[in-house]
């Protein structure tokens, strides 16, 4: 009790200090002599900042208007009739040129060295035609038609390679891809 009275006379607190009260904030010692973090905002500087912001927004709007609209046909996905054509062409080519085709024909009761060999020779001609049609279609759709319609050359090159002449027909049916700015003007 006497100790408490003495602390009260000296003006000291009677309770113990908490850990939070003893904590000193980092960089609170006023020795930070780096550049100021907040600039001096004057009306001229505010006007300049707003002008730059307006220019950036205008540039972003022009860039957005120059983008092409989203189109499902621009994905590098082979769907529908192109997928069916690719599957049939792949099976046909693998059957005509496969190493195990003579064994499969002999299991089916066809002599691989006689009439089966002639059958394989005959099947290889249309298989080569399918491969050539795929290569030709990829060149026509990816190099000739797609750039003229503002379409992705790579996507249509792949679709032409896998989808064959059906990709060229599908690309001919499509209209030219328009930018967002062009479609808003109409």
Image (cartoon, rainbow, N blue to C red):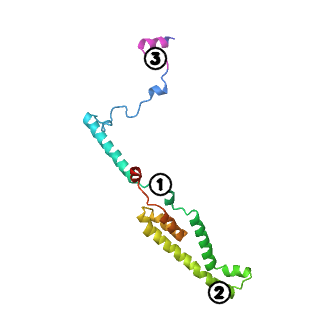
Q: Which residue is mark 1?
A: 70
Examine the rendered structure and indicate whether residue 23 appears above or below residue 144: above
Q: Residues within 10 Å of mark 1 (few under 14, many from 20)?
A: few
CA gap between label 2 and label 1 equals: 50 Å
Is residue 9 within the magenta segment?
Answer: yes
Look at discs 3 and 1 and give the one toward the viewer.
Answer: 1
Q: Residue at x 62, y 79 (%)?
A: 96
- Residue 78: image x %, image y %? 55, 63
- Residue 175: image x %, image y %? 46, 60
Mark 3 and mark 1 lie on one chain; the one further toward the N terminus is: 3
Q: Are marks 3 and 2 in contact (CB under 8 Å)?
A: no
Q: Which residue is mark 2?
A: 118
Mark 2 and mark 1 lie on one chain; the one further toward the N terminus is: 1
Secondary structure beneath dot 3 equals loop
Q: Determine which of the numbered discs, if any, sits on residue 13 in the image.
A: 3
Secondary structure beneath dot 1 equals loop
* Along the viewing direction, whichever of 38 and 8 lies nearer the viewer: 38
Q: Answer left or right for 68 relative to 107.
A: left
Q: Answer left or right for 23 relative to 52.
A: right
Examine the rendered structure and indicate whether residue 145 appears above or below residue 49: below
Q: Residue at x 58, y 63 (%)?
A: 80
Q: Residue at x 41, y 31 (%)?
A: 25
Instruction: Please tell me whether the stretch drawn in magenta is mainly helix, strand or loop.
Output: helix
Q: Determine which of the numbered discs, if any, sits on residue 133 in the image.
A: none
CA gap between label 3 and label 1 equals: 72 Å
- Residue 56: image x %, image y %? 34, 46
CA gap between label 3 and label 2 equals: 110 Å
Residue sitting at the far front: 186
* Residues shaded magenta: 3-15
- Residue 61: image x %, image y %? 37, 48
Q: Residue at x 45, y 27 (%)?
A: 22
């Amino acid at each position: 009790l006497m100790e408490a009275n003495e602390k009260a006379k000296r003006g000291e607190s009677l309770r113990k200090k908490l850990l939070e009260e003893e904590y000193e904030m980092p960089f609170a010692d006023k020795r930070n002599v780096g550049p100021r973090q907040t600039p001096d905002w004057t009306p001229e500087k505010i006007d300049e900042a707003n002008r730059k912001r307006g220019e950036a927004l205008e540039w972003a709007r022009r860039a957005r208007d120059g983008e092409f609209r989203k189109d499902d046909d621009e994905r590098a996905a082979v769907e529908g009739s192109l997928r069916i054509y690719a599957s049939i062409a792949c099976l046909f080519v693998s059957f005509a040129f496969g190493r195990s085709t003579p064994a499969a024909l002999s299991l089916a009761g066809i002599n691989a060295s006689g009439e089966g060999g002639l059958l394989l020779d005959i099947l290889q001609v249309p298989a080569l035609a399918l491969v050539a049609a795929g290569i030709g279609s990829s060149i026509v759709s990816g190099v000739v038609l797609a750039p003229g319609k503002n379409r992705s050359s790579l996507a249509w090159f792949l679709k032409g390679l896998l989808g064959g002449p059906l990709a060229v027909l599908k690309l001919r049916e499509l209209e030219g891809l328009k930018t967002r700015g062009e479609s808003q003007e109409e």
